[in-house]
Image (cartoon, helix red, strand yellow):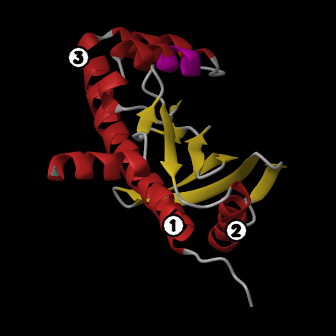
Amino acid sequence: MKIIIITLLIASYSYGQQYTEENGIFHYKDVVEVEKSKEDIKSIIKKWSAVNFNNSNYVTRLDTDDELVIKGSFSIKTDGVKEDIDFTMDVAFKEERYKLEFYYLSNVNNYIGIKFPITHPDKFTKEQFKSSCIEMINQMGFGKKMALKRIEKEKVFNKYYERSKADMAKTYFKVEDKIKSLALSIKNDVSNKKKDDW
């Protein structure tokens, strides 16, 4: 009996968070059930956004009865280097539930100056890394030949790839932690706020 009750409680909270698209690029998605009207949920989340995204990058892009789309940013620090991450927060509303998504996160620099989408390290492949390196090299004004030769040397390439993958892992999990904390903060506000009848 206890197992059934616990299962029902978990099911009533959430359909389960997802953190990546099929290709491994970061895309948080969750559906949260809460005993509030669509209007109350939206009102609480709008207020939460106004309070928590108090920087100049905070912009409401869409505000309808059923959806709220907001641009925001946060900073993470990896190996002492600060990285600003822009994102889109998309919230859809229905009676007694909302769907929360964070996507279109800005690309991040690796240690040799190539920008990559924030990708789960298990999906950050050598092929993706190599094609990004070649794309960057092709945009160089000079030194293309020498740079391409370095990439073609397997030992050098593997060293660059392994270091970049390790950096991506640090970045990915810091971003995941930050998004989890934002999502939890929203959930707590929506779950705990009573209707203001003053």
Q: Nearer the viewer, mark 1 or mark 2?
A: 1
Residue 11, compared with residue 187, is above or below; it is above
Who is closer to the viewer here, 187 or 120? 187
Q: Residues within 10 Å of mark 1 (few under 14, many from 20)?
A: some
Q: Is residue 195 above or below residue 180?
A: below
Q: Nearer the viewer, mark 3 or mark 1?
A: 1
Q: Residue at x 73, y 85 (%)?
A: 197
Mark before the other along the chain sequence, 3 or 1: 3
Q: Look at mark 1 in the image and give the residue it sits on.
A: 191
Q: Is residue 50 above or below residue 84?
A: below
Residue at the (51%, 39%) spot, across then down: 29
Q: Which residues are magenta?
A: 132-137
- Name the image quarter holding residue 143: top right
Q: Magenta span: helix, strand or loop, mainly? A: helix
- Dot 3 and dot 1 residues touching (CB under 8 Å): no
Q: Is residue 166 magenta?
A: no
Q: Which mark is residue 166?
A: none
| Location of mark 3 (residue) | 155
Residues marked 1 and 2 touching at CB (< 8 Å): no
Q: Secondary structure at mark 3?
A: helix
Q: Residue placed farthest to the front in the image?
A: 1
Identity, as a three-letter code, of the amino acid under mark 3: Lys
First in residue order: circle 2 vs circle 3: 2
| Real-space CA distance between mark 1 and mark 2, rounded to the nearest whole angstrom | 25 Å
